[in-house]
Image: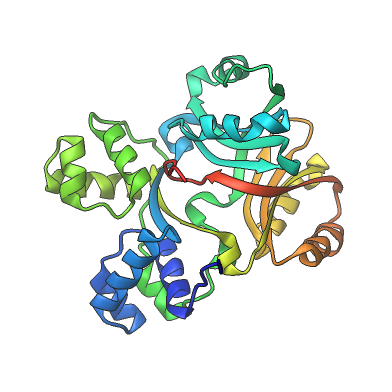
């Protein structure tokens, strides 16, 4: 069966939803120069076929949580089952099989007061098929998260981007969670464009209260919206995770530089034997080689790079969807 392809409108919708995951179809139609019905039909087709999904994502650091990147090495015959068990958890995201199916990587978070590595690892599936587990605490993110992936944000022109961009005020103070917020986050992790009526029903609030609460969570930076789409449909058929060892004096400069590269979806400084983690998407093997040899290889201070191609993504930033 041929893989689905994204046409020009699909790409523009993907870019638009990255800017504002809950933009009304009427506003989107106006900016894109098509009808409301065309936008609605195209979005529902993309979502119903599993090509694209808009999801709401709590910003863990704004909610007093610490983010960890886990590397779980296991026996090949157990990797898929363990990855699925991790994906089913509400506190995990970006669960991937890498390294010929012998390693699982995923992100998880824990309340800051409970961010003990021993407690974290103790919550993982208990099985003798797991060979080793390492946890890397994310210290600072330079690309990814609320900013999205610049490499897939090129379908709209500057005027369209400006028209769809909301300048949220932001706040240095973490918002206090309220009763009903967990239900709200759960619903948005499944469908970031769920109606106010649906969100009101699951959170036990009125639609007006839900609207105000969403605005507050977004303006404080505690909630953002992401677009889940297979990177291969955007021309990046080879995805990989990279672990870099960078001189401490060059860490900030290198992180900020690689964050500008269109291949890079995530850049984060971490604890552990390496100190910078990248998630990238390249066209093919040659493009990955060029990225490693000519882009990273030209950066002073980068001493070592470990590369792990992603074989399969079991879960992205939203809730797990059974295959």
Image coordinates of residue 237 in percent, x first then y, are 66, 63
Q: Is residue 302 left or right of residue 149?
A: right
Q: Is residue 109 visible?
A: yes
**Colouring method of the image:** rainbow
Image coordinates of residue 38 in percent, x first then y, are 29, 78
Residue occupying image coordinates x 74% and y 65%:
284
Image coordinates of residue 99 in percent, x first then y, are 75, 42
Q: In the image, is residue 257 above or below residue 207?
A: below
Which of the 4 image quarters holds residue 276?
A: top right
Q: In the image, is residue 307 above or below residue 116?
A: below
User: Is 232 or 135 nearer to us in this picture?
Assistant: 232
Residue occupying image coordinates x 68% and y 48%:
310
Residue occupying image coordinates x 20% and y 38%:
202
Which of the 4 image quarters holds residue 262?
A: bottom right
Count of labels in the image: 0
User: Is 95 or 74 nearer to us in this picture?
Assistant: 74
Residue occupying image coordinates x 70% and y 44%:
277
Image coordinates of residue 149 in percent, x first then y, are 56, 59
Q: Is residue 27 left or right of residue 56?
A: left
Quadrant of the frame with the N terminus: bottom right
Q: Is residue 20 visible?
A: no
User: Is 228 or 216 nearer to us in this picture?
Assistant: 228
The residue most toward the front is 1
């Amino acid at each position: 069966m041929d893989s689905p392809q994204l046409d020009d409108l699909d790409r523009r919708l993907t870019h638009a939803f990255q800017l504002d995951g809950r933009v009304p179809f009427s506003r989107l139609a106006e900016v894109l120069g098509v009808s409301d019905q065309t936008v609605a039909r195209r979005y529902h087709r993309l979502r119903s076929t599993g090509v694209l999904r808009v999801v709401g994502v709590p910003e863990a650091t704004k909610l007093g949580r610490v983010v960890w990147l886990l590397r779980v090495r296991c026996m090949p015959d157990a990797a898929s089952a363990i990855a699925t068990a991790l994906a089913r958890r509400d506190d995990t995201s970006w669960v991937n099989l890498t390294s010929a199916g012998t390693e699982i990587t995923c992100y998880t978070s824990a309340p800051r007061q409970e961010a003990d590595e021993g407690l974290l690892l103790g919550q993982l599936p208990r099985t003798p098929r797991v060979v080793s587990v390492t946890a890397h605490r994310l210290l600072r993110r330079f690309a990814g998260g609320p900013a999205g992936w610049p490499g897939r944000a090129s379908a709209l022109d500057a005027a369209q981007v400006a028209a769809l961009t909301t300048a949220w005020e932001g706040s240095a103070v973490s918002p206090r969670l309220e009763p009903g917020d967990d239900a709200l986050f759960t619903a948005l992790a499944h469908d970031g464009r769920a109606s106010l009526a649906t969100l009101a029903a699951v959170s036990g609030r009125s639609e007006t209260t839900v609207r105000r609460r969403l605005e507050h969570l977004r303006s404080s930076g505690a909630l953002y919206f992401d677009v889940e789409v297979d990177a291969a449909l955007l021309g990046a058929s080879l995805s990989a995770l990279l672990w870099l060892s960078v001189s401490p004096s060059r860490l900030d400069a290198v992180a900020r530089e690689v964050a500008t590269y269109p291949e890079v979806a995530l850049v984060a400084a971490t604890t552990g034997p390496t100190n910078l983690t990248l998630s990238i998407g390249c066209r093919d093997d040659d493009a990955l080689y060029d990225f490693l040899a000519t882009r990273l290889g030209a950066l002073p201070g980068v001493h070592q790079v470990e590369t792990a191609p992603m074989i399969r993504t079991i879960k992205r930033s939203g809730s797990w969807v059974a295959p």
